C-alpha cells in the first residue's frame, strides 16, 4: 500500500512538472493528465476532497485576482495550503471542461509585455500549478490538514480588503515577498546547474544575499543597484531565463503601481 501511495505521488508530481515543457496548444491534454493522476489515487483524491469541504471557490477565485482601479495587477494564491489545493484543483478542472477559458485567463494575469503566450503558460505553471503540486504532495506524505474555520469572505469584503491592503502599504510587502521567492529559486537553480562556473555562482549568490539584506532593511536604492549587477550575471545562464524575466516583470509592475 505504501509503495502504491509513493508511486501515485511520483506520477502526480511528474505530471505537474511536465507541464512546464508543454506547448500551450497541448495544455488541455497535460492538465487532463494531472487531474487523472489525482482521480486514480485514493490518497490524492481523498486529500483534495477534504480541502474542498466548505471551500468557497467563487469567493477565493475573486480574492486571488488582485486589481487596482479596474486594472489587472496579478493573480495571487492564498497562504493556506488547503486553500491552494482547493482553488487550483477547481481552476484546473474548469480548464479541463472549458468552463474557464485558459487562453483568456493567461492573457489577463500571466502574459508579459510582449504578449508572449508561451511565456504566459510557463508563468502560470510556475505560479499556480507548482505551488499546488508542492502543497498537495507535502500533505499526502505526512502533514496533517489543519481545519480552517474561517468563513470565506463575500465579494464586497474582498474588494474592501484589497483596498485596505493597498492603503496600508502592503503592496511593498507583497513585492518583497515575490522578489524574495524568485531570488531563492534562482539560487536553487544555479546550485544544480553544472554549466554555471563556481566563481560565477559565488558572484550571483553574493549579489542575491545583498538584495535580500537590502529588502530586510527596506532600502530600495541598494536593491536597485544590485539588481543591475544581477541581470548582467544571469544573462548567459539559460536555466534561469524564466526567473530573470519574472523578476523584471515584477519590478516593472511594482514601479508602475507606485507611479499611479
Image (cartoon, grey):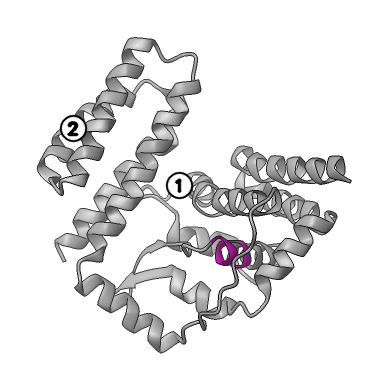
Badge nearest the viewer, 1 or 2: 2
Q: Where does the image place residue 106, in percent across and percent down from the top left? A: 50, 58
For residue 69, say whether it is visible. no
* Marker disc for residue 226: 2
Q: Residue at x 31, y 25 (%)?
A: 205
Label 1 SS = loop
In the displayed structure image, the side of residue 104 where residue 91 appears, left or right: right
Q: Residue at x 44, y 63 (%)?
A: 108
2 or 189: nearer the eye?
Answer: 2
Residue positioned 47% across, 59% down in the render: 107
- In this rendering, is residue 74 above or below 205? below
Category of crowding for the residue at label 2, using alpha-carbon neighbours closer than 10 angstroms: few (below 14), some (14–19), many (at least 20): some
Q: Secondary structure at mark 2?
A: helix
Magenta segment main secondary structure: helix
- Side of 171 where 15 appears, left or right: right
- Could you say where residue 254 lies in the image, as x and y percent from the top left? 24, 55
Residue 149 at what x, y percent from top left?
A: 55, 79
Does the image show residue 33?
yes
Magenta stretch bounds: 81-86
Q: Residue furthest right?
A: 1
Instruction: Tell me if 227 is positioned left or right of 53 in this view.
Output: left
Callout 1 crowding tier (Cα within 10 Å): few <14, some 14–19, many ≥20? few
**Image quarter of residue 256:** bottom left
- Per the model, the C-alpha gap separating discs 1 and 2 is 27 Å
Tag 1 residue: 116
Please say if 47 is above or below 201: below
Residue 209 locus on image (x, y percent): 26, 31
Q: Quadrant of the C terminus?
A: bottom left
Q: Quadrant of residue 110?
A: bottom left
Q: Of callouts 1 and 2, which one flags the residue occurring earlier in the amino acid sequence?
A: 1
Amino acid at each position: 500500500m505504501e509503495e502504491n501511495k509513493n508511486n501515485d505521488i511520483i506520477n502526480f508530481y511528474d505530471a505537474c512538472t511536465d507541464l512546464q515543457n508543454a506547448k500551450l496548444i497541448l495544455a488541455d491534454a497535460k492538465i487532463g493528465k494531472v487531474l487523472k493522476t489525482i482521480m486514480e489515487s485514493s490518497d490524492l483524491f481523498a486529500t483534495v476532497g477534504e480541502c474542498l469541504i466548505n471551500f468557497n471557490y467563487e469567493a477565493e477565485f475573486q480574492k486571488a485576482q488582485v486589481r487596482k482601479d479596474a486594472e489587472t495587477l496579478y493573480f495571487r494564491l492564498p497562504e493556506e495550503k488547503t486553500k491552494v489545493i482547493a482553488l487550483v484543483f477547481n481552476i484546473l478542472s474548469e480548464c479541463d471542461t472549458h468552463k474557464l477559458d485558459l487562453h483568456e485567463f493567461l492573457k489577463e494575469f500571466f502574459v508579459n509585455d510582449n504578449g508572449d503566450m508561451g511565456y504566459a503558460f510557463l508563468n502560470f505553471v510556475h505560479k499556480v500549478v507548482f505551488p499546488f503540486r508542492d502543497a498537495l504532495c507535502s500533505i499526502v506524505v505526512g502533514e496533517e490538514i489543519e481545519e480552517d474555520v474561517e468563513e470565506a469572505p463575500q465579494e464586497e469584503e474582498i474588494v474592501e480588503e484589497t483596498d485596505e491592503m493597498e492603503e496600508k502599504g502592503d503592496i511593498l510587502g507583497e513585492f518583497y515577498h515575490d522578489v524574495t521567492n524568485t531570488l531563492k529559486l534562482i539560487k536553487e537553480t544555479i546550485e544544480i546547474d553544472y554549466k554555471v562556473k563556481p566563481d560565477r555562482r559565488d558572484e550571483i549568490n553574493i549579489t542575491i544575499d545583498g538584495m535580500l539584506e537590502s529588502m530586510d532593511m527596506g532600502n530600495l536604492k541598494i536593491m536597485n543597484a544590485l539588481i543591475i549587477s544581477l541581470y548582467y550575471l544571469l544573462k548567459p545562464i539559460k536555466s534561469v531565463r524564466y526567473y530573470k524575466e519574472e523578476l523584471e516583470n515584477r519590478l516593472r509592475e511594482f514601479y508602475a503601481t507606485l507611479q499611479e
